[in-house]
Amino acid sequence: MSRTIAFGLSLAASLAICVAETAGAANYTVLHTFLGGNDGKFPESGLIEDGNGNLYGVTVFGGGAGCGGSGCGTVFKIAPNRSETVLYAFKGGSDGAFPDPI
């Protein structure tokens, strides 16, 4: 059974990551809601899935108080058990800021 990955927008205007099964009617499950702060805010890229089912992506904001208080962005992982881990929080300056793969 194949799966596609899509981003969903919650009523609170925070982005959530959803997985939809393409067989039959689409059923969506929210895996993580990004609230800003340390866990990131505004995931705006596609996701990459590894062989263990972990999903990887970036958020444009969040990850700390840098970049004028909004955070400079993150690289994150969402495990099959739906737990989110920030792998890297951008600090601005020489490491970059506001990752936008578009």
Image (cartoon, rainbow, N blue to C red):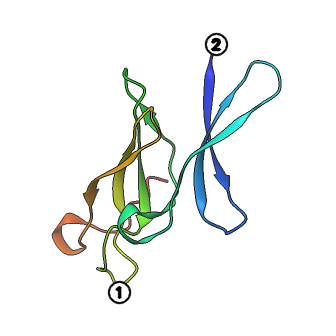
Q: What residue type is labelled 1?
A: Gly
Q: Where is residue 42 in the image (x, y as percent from the top left)?
A: 52, 63
Q: Nearer the viewer, mark 1 or mark 2?
A: 2
61 displayed left or right of 64: right
Q: Which of 75 and 53 is in front in this view?
A: 53
Which type of secondary structure does the marked residue at label 2 adopt?
loop
Q: Residue furthest right?
A: 25
Q: Which residue lies furthest to the bottom in this view?
A: 68
| Residue for point 72% across, 23% down | 22
Which badge, 1 or 2, comes first in the chain's sequence?
Answer: 2
Q: Position of residue 39 (x, y in %)?
A: 39, 61
User: CA–CA distance between discs 1 and 2?
Assistant: 45 Å
Graded by Cα atoms within 10 Å as few (under 14), some (14 to 19) or many (20 or more), the crowding at tag 1 reads few
Q: Position of residue 63 (x, y in %)?
A: 33, 67
Query: In the rendering, which numbered label is found on residue 1?
Result: 2
Q: Nearer the viewer, residue 84 or 88?
A: 84
Q: Is residue 33 above or below residue 72?
A: above
Query: In the rendering, which numbered label is found on residue 68?
Result: 1
Q: Position of residue 95 (x, y in %)?
A: 20, 65
